[in-house]
Image (spheres, helix red, strand yellow):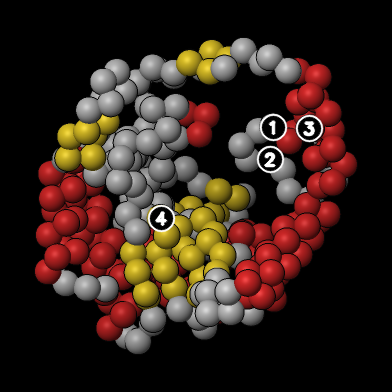
C-alpha cells in the first residue's frame, strides 16, 4: 500500500508480504545475474545475462505474435538521449550509443518499425558526462531543456537501423506551459525536417496526455497537456493541449 500527495516528494509505503517479495527479488536476481538487492530499483544495473534474456524475449515474442496475427506490425521502443561529445569525449559517446542502442540492432532486424523516446541530450567530455551548460534551462526532471535532440536521435537511429520510426515519447516536465508549447514546436520542427529528407517517421506521440504518476517520483513532475487535480481528479486542458490539437488537426506527420 502506498500513499502520495500532489507535489510531495516523500513516499510512504507498507509492504504486507515481505517474504514473498524477497523470494521474487531472489529469483529475478538469479535470472538476470545481479544481486537481489539491486533488482527493486527503477534503473537496475544491467548484466550480460539480463540483456541476453531481454533480446531473446523480444525475438520470441515477435514470432509468437506473428503466428497469431501475421499482419501485425511489431517493433520495440527505446529511450535515447541525444549523445554528444566535446573534444575528447568521443569514446564515451561511442560507448553510450553501443550500450543504449547499437547492441540491440541484430535483434531488431525482423521488426517492422522502431519506437523512439527522447527528452534531452547528454554531453560527454574526456572524463565522462558533463553537467548542463551554465545558464541552461532545466526541466523538473533535472534534464536540460533540449527539444532539438529529437531530430538528431531520429537521424541517428534511421542511419543505423533503416526502418520506419515512430516517436513513442517526447515531452517536458514543467509547470510553465508556455515552455511546453515551445518544446512541442521545436521538436516537431525537427520531425518535419526529417520527413522532408525522406526519413519515414510514421507518427509522433507526445508525453503525456495527462499529468502522470512518474515512477518513484510520484505526481511532482508534470508532463501533461492536461492538468490533473489529484484530490478531485478534475481534468483541465492546458494551452499546450489546444496548441498541440491545432497542429494535429491542420497537418499530418
Residue 229 at x, y percent in the picture: 26, 25
Residue plotted at (66% across, 16% down): 15
Counting other residues with Cα less than 10 Å from the Cα at mark 1, is it few (<14), some (14-19), or many (20 or more)?
few
The mark that comes first in sequence, 4 or 1, is: 1
Q: Which residue is mark 3?
A: 25
Mark toward the viewer: 2 or 1? 1
> Are discs 3 and 1 less than 8 Å apart at CB?
yes
Residue 227 at x, y percent in the picture: 24, 34
- How far is mark 2 from mark 1, CA to CA? 7 Å
Residue plotted at (24% across, 56% down): 184
**Quadrant in which residue 35 is drawn:** top right
Counting other residues with Cα less than 10 Å from the Cα at mark 2, is it few (<14), some (14-19), or many (20 or more)?
few
> Are discs 2 and 1 less than 8 Å apart at CB?
yes
Residue plotted at (73% across, 61% down): 57
Mark toward the viewer: 2 or 4? 4
Q: Which residue is mark 2?
A: 44
Q: Which residue is mark 4?
A: 169
Amino acid at each position: 500500500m502506498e500513499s502520495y500527495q500532489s507535489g510531495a516528494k516523500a513516499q510512504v509505503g507498507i509492504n504486507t508480504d515481505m517474504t514473498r517479495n524477497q523470494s521474487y527479488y531472489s529469483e529475478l536476481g538469479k535470472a538476470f545475474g545481479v544481486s537481489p538487492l539491486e533488482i527493486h530499483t527503477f534503473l537496475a544495473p544491467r548484466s550480460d545475462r539480463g540483456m541476453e534474456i531481454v533480446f531473446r524475449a523480444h525475438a520470441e515474442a515477435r514470432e509468437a505474435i506473428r503466428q497469431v496475427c501475421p499482419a501485425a506490425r511489431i517493433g520495440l521502443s527505446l529511450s535515447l538521449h541525444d549523445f554528444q561529445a566535446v573534444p575528447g569525449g568521443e569514446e564515451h559517446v561511442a560507448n553510450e550509443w553501443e550500450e543504449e542502442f547499437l547492441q540491440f540492432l541484430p535483434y531488431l532486424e525482423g521488426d517492422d518499425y522502431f519506437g523512439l523516446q527522447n527528452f534531452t541530450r547528454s554531453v560527454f567530455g574526456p572524463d565522462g558526462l558533463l553537467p548542463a551548460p551554465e545558464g541552461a534551462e532545466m526541466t523538473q526532471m533535472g534534464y536540460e531543456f533540449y527539444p532539438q535532440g529529437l531530430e538528431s536521435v531520429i537521424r541517428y537511429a534511421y542511419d543505423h537501423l533503416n526502418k520506419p520510426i515512430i516517436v513513442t515519447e517526447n515531452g517536458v516536465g514543467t509547470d510553465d506551459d508556455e515552455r511546453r508549447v515551445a518544446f512541442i514546436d521545436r521538436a516537431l520542427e525537427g520531425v518535419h525536417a526529417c520527413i522532408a529528407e525522406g526519413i519515414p517517421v510514421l507518427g509522433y506521440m507526445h508525453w503525456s496526455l495527462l499529468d502522470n504518476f512518474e515512477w518513484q517520483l510520484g505526481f511532482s513532475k508534470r508532463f501533461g497537456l492536461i492538468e490533473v487535480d489529484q484530490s478531485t481528479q478534475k481534468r483541465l486542458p492546458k494551452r499546450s493541449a489546444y496548441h498541440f490539437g491545432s497542429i494535429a488537426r491542420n497537418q499530418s506527420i
